[in-house]
Each structure stands twice: as structure tokens, then as C-alpha cells.
Image (cartoon, helix red, strand yellow):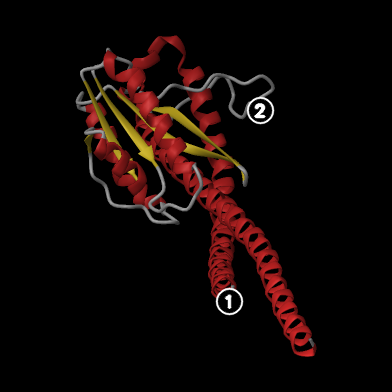
Amino acid sequence: MAGGIRAIKDRIRSVANTSKVTRAMELVAASKMRRATNRALQSRPYADRMTSVLNEIADALGSTQGESAHPLLTTRPVSNVVYIHITADRGLAGGLSANMNRAGASFLLEHQPNVDSMTVIPLGRKGKDFFSRAGMVMEDWPSLGDFPDFSDVKPIAASVIEQFQNGEIDQVFVGFSRFINAAIQRPETVQVLPIEPPADEEGAEQTLSGDMLFEPSPVELLDTLLPRYVEMQLYAAVLEARASEQSARMVAMRQATDAANDMVDSLTLEYNKARQEGITGELLDIVGGTAALEG
């Protein structure tokens, strides 16, 4: 009995120590989540404004120039596709990475039969390991870390833009986890190249006049605006993915802490029962011994 009580006590101590670790990881993830979500949310007004300006410039150019206004707007038969897959570098984030990898695999299975080649650019060790096991053709880029800067994303955007303009690739997609709130992160895939001017939204604010004079020329304007738009889309996706990662890790560690605390409570109850049974057994032995002496 003593050995069983000691084993339960050791297990309580072990689970309690685990609970302290997960609680500390939850607090760290919560701090990082606040910073990551602030960066993601602060990027959205800029992205929305840039999308609106691009939309109105495209409308102003009209059908006279259309896709010929810039190479990045040119749609051509699709033979070679690049898929940028953004995941976490570390685990302990619940099912976030598994859900993102599953969504990426579904996207590739849907599009791969229709093209000649499909290249994956994994940004994150979890995605890289997943597609390595699947034998996919990949471009290797360094990890972006927990709080990537805009300068970290620009070389990747510049690479795919150059390949697209040279005709080496025909489409570029980016897959990431969209941050909805601390409890919800939604896998999402968007087309980056060729750029598709967003459709007008009903009730959207119109900021530019319908009759515009371009200085410099529209092509020179788009030469600057469209590459920056691609960089912005990719950077916004990275920020959304990092916010999703930290929020998912915070929730996972909170659930782990709650589960550990529940286990400690259950083991404590079991320990008290075993201890009470031991005390009762000792009392019965004492009473029995006393009765035998008196007899």
C-alpha cells in the first residue's frame, strides 16, 4: 500500500510540474499573440487601401489596355505553378499545422493533374517536413522567425515576380492560416500572380475620380505599384499566419494546463482515498491486536 501511495504522490508531482511548464508557455504565447495580432491587424488598412487604389486604376485604364497594361496582369495558359506554403516552425500549436498541411495537400492534388510542374515554397519547418516526405519539388528559403519584417519577404516576392515575367512560371498561389480570432484560424489560399484586380464591393468608398490623368504614364505607375502589391499580399499572409500560430499555441497550452490541473485533482482524490484506506487498515490492525491481548 505504501508503494502505491508513493507512486501516486510522485505522479501528482510530475503532472503539477508539467502544468507549470504549460502555463508558462501559455503566457509566453499570449504575449507573442498580442504582438503578432497587432501587426496583422495594423497591416489590413494599408492592404485594403492599396487594393482599392489598384481597383480604381484598373477601372480607369478600362478595356482599351486591359491585361496588356502590365506583364503582371497578363493571364496565359497555365503550365508551371508555384505554391507558397506558410506554416509554423515549431509544434505545440494544436491542429494548426496539420490543418494547413492538409489544405495545402488538397490544393496540390486538385491542381497538379492540370499542369506540367508544381513547385512548393515552404515557409516554415512544419510545411517543409510535410512536403519533403511527399517528395514534392521545393525551393528552399530560410525561416522567417516569429516576427518577420517586410524586408524578409521582399526577396521571395522578387524571385516569383522575376520568374513570372520571364515566363518560367504561369501562376503563383500562397496558402496560409487566416487569423479570425484567438479560437479560430482558417486555412486559405489566394492567387498572387497574375494579379487579378479585385471586384468592386457594394458600398465601397470611391477615392479616385473616374477621369484621371497619369503622370508618369500608367505603365510606369504600375511598374511600381504592382510589385509592391505582390509584396504586400505575401507579407500580409505571413503576418496572418504568425498571428494564427501564436493564438493556436496559446489555446493549446491553456487546454493542456487545464487538463493537467484536472488530472492533479483526480490523482489527489485517489491519493487521499488510498491514504485513508491505509490509515483504516492500520487502525483495524491495532484494534485487532488489542483485542487479542485482552483475550
Horizontal and vertical percent position of residue 57: 49, 24
Label count reads: 2
Amino acid carrying mark 2 in the image: Glu
Q: What element carries label 1?
A: helix
> Mark 2 highlights which residue?
205
Residue toward you, 294 or 222:
294
The relative height of residue 26 versus residue 110 in the rendered view (above or below) is below
Q: Residue drawn 28% across and 51% down?
A: 142
Horizontal and vertical percent position of residue 71: 30, 23
Q: Residue drawn 33% across and 24% down?
A: 108
Real-space Cα distance between discs 2 and 1? Answer: 75 Å
Residue toward you, 196 or 272:
272
Q: Residue drawn 53% across and 45% down?
A: 244
In primary-sequence order, the first of circles 2 and 1 is: 1
> Mark 1 highlights which residue?
2
Which quadrant is home to the N terminus? bottom right
Horizontal and vertical percent position of residue 228: 40, 38
Amino acid carrying mark 1 in the image: Ala
Which quadrant is home to the C terminus? bottom right
Q: Quadrant of residue 132?
A: top left
Please say if the residues under marks 2 and 1 sit with CB atoms less than 8 Å apart: no
Furthest residue toward top:
63
Please give the label number shown on residue 208: none
Q: Answer yes or no: is residue 209 visible.
A: yes
Q: In which quarter of the image is residue 199?
A: top right
The relative height of residue 149 versus residue 214 in the rendered view (above or below) is below
Horizontal and vertical percent position of residue 3: 54, 74
